[in-house]
Image (cartoon, rainbow, N blue to C red):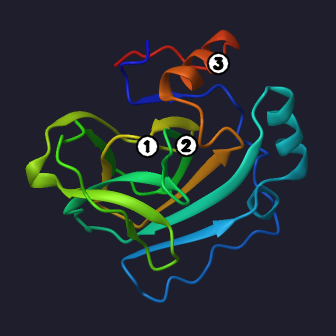
Amino acid sequence: MTNHCWYTVKIDMEKAFNPSFVLPFTNQKPLRMWGYKPSDIFNPEWIEYTKLLGINFKGIILFYRKNYIEAKKAHIDIYPPSVITHFGFNWVGGGKGSKMIWYETPKEKTDIKYTDVNTPYLDWPVTELTPIEEYEIKDKLTLVKTGIPHEIYNVTNDRWCISARTDWLSNTSWEEIVDYLDKRNLLEPRNI
């Protein structure tokens, strides 16, 4: 079951969002990211609901990507200072037709780099990588594999992605989180 790179999660998102949350200004930059506490974006009742299901969100990364921005590099998420983050819980608004694409991890090492908000990551040119899976994440909570190279191809409209991270960040493998959620019947069956 763990050979896939994504799974839709059986968690209702209808009342998930904090009504006082307002999307940040993008400054017309094509790519942006911000960090938030779960209570900034999510409704407190929904946070309690997910805790009862065994998921304790620790932080949120909000990503913005303008339409028709083609990624030239795929990246691996890093938890500071240098631990690979193997998964995130993503929800996407907009970005119709956008795809998250996963690649085989190359044998060649690369140096840790930092975003403009000092978030560490590893990256490689996509032209040097072999794609293994792709999926259009929509408005359903989706468990995504982030410990291998991945990137977003966005087309028709701007894309906002909330990537929620848990308190198991630095020591839980992809196989362990998939098994944990599967045993709790929280993963939708894969039809693809």
In the rendered structure, which amino acid carries the disc numbered 2?
Gly
In the rendered structure, which amino acid carries the disc numbered 3?
Tyr
Q: Nearer the viewer, residue 31 or 145?
A: 145
Q: Which mark is residue 180?
A: 3
Residue 54, image x and y in percent?
A: 79, 27
Residue 21, image x and y in percent?
A: 76, 69
The answer to whether the residues at label 1 and label 2 have Cβ atoms under 8 Å apart is: yes
The answer to whether the residues at label 1 and label 3 have Cβ atoms under 8 Å apart is: no
* Location of mark 2 (residue): 88
**104 shown above or below 57:** above
Quarter residue 61 falls in = bottom right
For mark 2, give the secondary structure: strand
Image quarter of the C terminus:
top left
* Location of mark 1 (residue): 146
Q: Residue placed at 74% from the left, 60% from the top?
A: 41
Classify 10 Å Cα crowding around label 3: few (below 14), some (14-19), many (20 and above). Answer: some
Residue 72, image x and y in percent?
A: 19, 63
Side of 192 where 130 appears, left or right = left
